[in-house]
Amino acid sequence: MQQIKRALIFAHYDRDGVIDPHVQYALQCYREVVNCLIVVSTSATALPESIAQHVDHFISRPNKGYDFCSWKKGMESLGDYRQFDEIICCNDSVYGPLFDLTPVLESPCLDEVDLWGMVHSVQGTKQRKTREPSNHLQSWFFGMRRNLIHSPVFDSFWKSITPLDKKNDVINAYEIGMTEKFREAGFRVGAIYDSADGSIKPNLSFLEIAPHLNWRNIRHSYRVIKKTRRRINNPSELAPIRLVQLGVPFLKVNAFVVNHYGLDLDFIRNELERMAYRQEIDYDLSLIDAHLMRVARGCAETRLKSF
């Protein structure tokens, strides 16, 4: 089997300007599956010595323009990016990988695609409600392959990236816009977890919701049911355990810190421990605990109780 020459560009931001241990672990894992690893940070000025040896290029830039500007900067540092068969862009908004990435990158469901991601979502922003569903790859981890990399539309898209001030504008123009632009140009799109093709129910069944309900707090339970039964949801934050079971080796940080759907975080943690015991995941869960202690300082639990 011909070896794929792969580059990965990692967009980093941390409010304290540190490279958190869970990020360091992720970079070590990425190093094992790519030929070139680039880290672009809008907060840190240097890499820890323990991780610097794994990174080919480290770029520190002003905190402006969100991740797409970081990925564009990393793309420029590749030089002739057409030398690569695949370019992956990802960020630090997830914990993981929870298990070996190699089978994920070689997944049969991605065999015939040019643009792929971990999660294909139908959720748009508030500004795009009239255009629902907004079928697109979530941009926290996506890859672009050779046919796409060598196309004029690839150059056109990345040259069009400019700093935008509002997150929803970035999502509309670049996250959703990227999938739409490349798909309209005839390129094939795929994902490990595809909630847009109709094969996966976009909302949770009652059996999936039940562990997150607190019958001593009817108001809380009603809001959980209402939010989790919507037709349009964010699968990465709505169904973290389901995603892992279906092959996505990551957990969104916001599922723990923001917990928009009011999920029972103790239940999720217990499920992860059971999966680790059964060797379905291979990840030090204390990395999650330590990160939450620093950035959330109990906010996740407080928000859950006050949901």
Image (tube, helix red, strand yellow):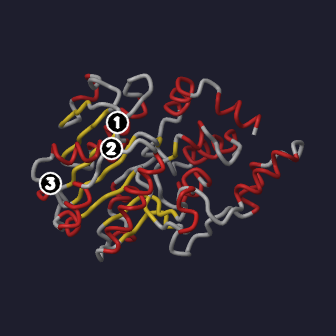
Disc 3 to disc 1, C-alpha distance: 24 Å
Whether tag 3 and tag 1 are in contact, CB under 8 A, the answer is no
Disc 2 to disc 3, C-alpha distance: 22 Å
- Type of the residue with mark 3: Tyr
Of marks 2 and 3, which one's residue comes earlier in the chain?
A: 3
Compare residues 233 and 178 and report the one nearer the observer: 178
Work out whether 14 lies above or below 194. above
In the rendered structure, the answer to whether residue 214 lies left or right of residue 134 reads: right
- Name the disc covering residue 283, or none: none
Q: Residues within 10 Å of mark 1 (few under 14, many from 20)?
A: few
Helix, strand or loop at label 3? It is helix
Q: Which residue is mark 2?
A: 163
Residue at (31, 33) in percent of width and height:
41
Helix, strand or loop at label 1? It is loop
| The N terminus sits in image quarter | bottom left
Residue at (48, 50) in percent of width and height:
168
Work out whether 214 lies above or below 154. above
Whether tag 2 and tag 1 are in contact, CB under 8 A, the answer is yes
- Name the disc covering residue 64, or none: 1
Helix, strand or loop at label 2? It is loop
Residue at (50, 66) in percent of width and height:
134
